[in-house]
Image: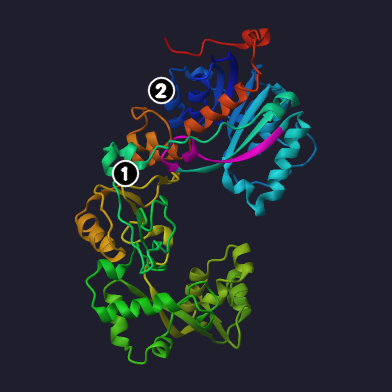
Amino acid sequence: MNKAFTFIDLFAGIGGFKMALTNNGGSCLGFSEVNKDAVNAYCQNHKVKPESNFGDITQIKELPYHDVLTAGVPCQSWSIAGKNLGFDDDRGQLWNDTIYLLNQSKPKAFIFENVKGLVDPRNKEALSYILERINQAGYHARPFVINSHDYGVAQNRIRIYIIGFKDKKYFDEFSLLKPFDKKETLADVLGLEKASKNQNKPLQKDLFGKIIQSRQMSLSSKNGFNDYFLFNDLRNGNTTIHSWDIEETTDRQKEICLLLLKNRRKSQFGPLDGNPLSLKQFQLLDSTISQKEIDNLIKLGILKRVEYKFEIFDFEDSDLNEEQLELLKLSSDNFIIIDKLKTERSLKMKRISIADTVSSLIEKNIVQCVEERFDFKNTKISSGINGVNRVFMPSSDVFPTLVASDTNDYISLKNITPTTHEEYKENFLKEVYFSNKYRKITKEEACLIQGFPKDFILPESRARWMKLIGNSVSVPVIDMLIKSIVLTGIFDDQPMNEKGKKHEVDLYVE
């Protein structure tokens, strides 16, 4: 039986907290959100009046009494401690604003959500500061790292949730409900038949009967075959699709590409994780490689020219700006090498663009390229190839994390039963990629992947609805968390708080 309680929804987004808490006996006394699309979606879907929006959190002085405070605090870049002068003087940073209102309103419990990066070692000091300020506000709290897939959505979404209680008795009673035994899969979201997603895929085995595992991480882990194909020229694997797999290339051209792929990360060719190679360096690996062969791969759009090393001519300091002088200071023996500049922290700290600054020096005839190298044209992993990063098969257990900016991830409209790795890749290219049997997820599917109803109302523009759904919490995770809080007994037999009644307003649309 649901226990009655009240709550306030900060950084409310489209109402993931609202949906879960309301379904578990909660009554919302108001929300805070500044994004217009989010406010419209919140009010329209949850039938709430816009007047119930408290607005910008930095302008909120006081909240009405409530039992639970929720907040999907944005993952902002922020200095850790503010002025450290107390709750009234640390305003203006969103975490501090949230804890200020927690301290002011003193609810019985709270749920705060943030990106998993908050628990990374590099952010240890930041997390410690947040927990310290929560403790100073009079709360006992603990962070939990939770994957949404464990609680019923077909998405690999890992987030940190900080759960806190004013009364230590309930903090000690609190524990997470166990992850679901039966997890929703991508095939469920796509509405495919059970037989399609649970087909008995054959295993590739060696001479000793041992399953041959894929060299890449699988998001499904059913057997030795991956459930997605990665479009990338910088890594290799059984389900990696390269530019030379897509373009019509000869065996010789494929060999040259693989030679670059296997050697570009070696330290003998440069200081970066991936380095371009000169013709002489190519010929150290294969003496028969010619400039003409390299040029043909450039024409195919697989390789590109890289101006790598520049000679410096005489110049007067007075003729140059601060960025140009800073870059020239990093020269060696009257030369600058682009890849070495990329490792220089001073340029990153001062946000000096290497490409723009070198171009300006070329225009002034102060530097001249003396060494050209060659690299793959597609060198940004997340961009993939031709706008495709990954294509997930319907057999995949999960889809990757939905983000506000959208991604170059797609789903295949056709499943392929793998036999060998070679045939699996060949059949994917023929039956899916070249046949255009793949697409991005729809708005309805994105809603289901986050645990919302598929008919949840969002803007028509993909960029706008993707921003809203990608920034949301996964509803089933919040549902699990509030159930876990209720099970501590924190709301047992409590009458509706008189102070809460006094502040409650008519928020719902008839």
Q: Which residue corresponds to the image point at 66% horizontal and 16% vertical from the top-left?
A: 65
Above or below, comparing residue 445 to residue 371 in the picture: above
**Residue at the spot of label 2:** 45
* On-image quarter of the C terminus: top left
> Where does the image place residue 297, in percent across and percent down from the top left?
29, 77
Q: Say if mark 1 contacts mark 2, CB within 8 Å.
A: no
Q: How is the image coloured?
A: rainbow
243 and 278: which is toward the camera: 243
At label 1, the amino acid type is Asn
Q: CA distance from mark 1 to mark 2?
A: 35 Å
Badge 2 local density, few (<14 within 10 Å), some, or many (20+)? some
Closer-to-camera residue (237/442): 237
* As drawn, 122 above or below 85: below
* Left or right side of 85 for 200: left
Residue at (38% x, 80% y) in the render = 259
- What span is in magenta? 141-155
Q: Secondary structure at mark 2?
A: helix
Tell whether position 160 is magenta.
no
Q: Helix, strand or loop at disc 1?
A: loop
The answer to whether residue 33 shows anywhere in this view is no
Most foreground residue, 125 or 192: 192
Residue 317 at x, y = what percent?
Answer: 63, 78
User: Does residue 216 lie above or below 92 as drawn?
Assistant: below
* Quadrant occupied by the N terminus: top right
Which residue is the extreme one toward the bottom? 287
Q: Quadrant of residue 226?
A: bottom left
Residue 152 within the magenta-colored segment of the rendering = yes
**Residue drawn at 59 percent across, 31 percent down:** 71
**In this figure, which residue is indicated by the disc labeled 1?**
198
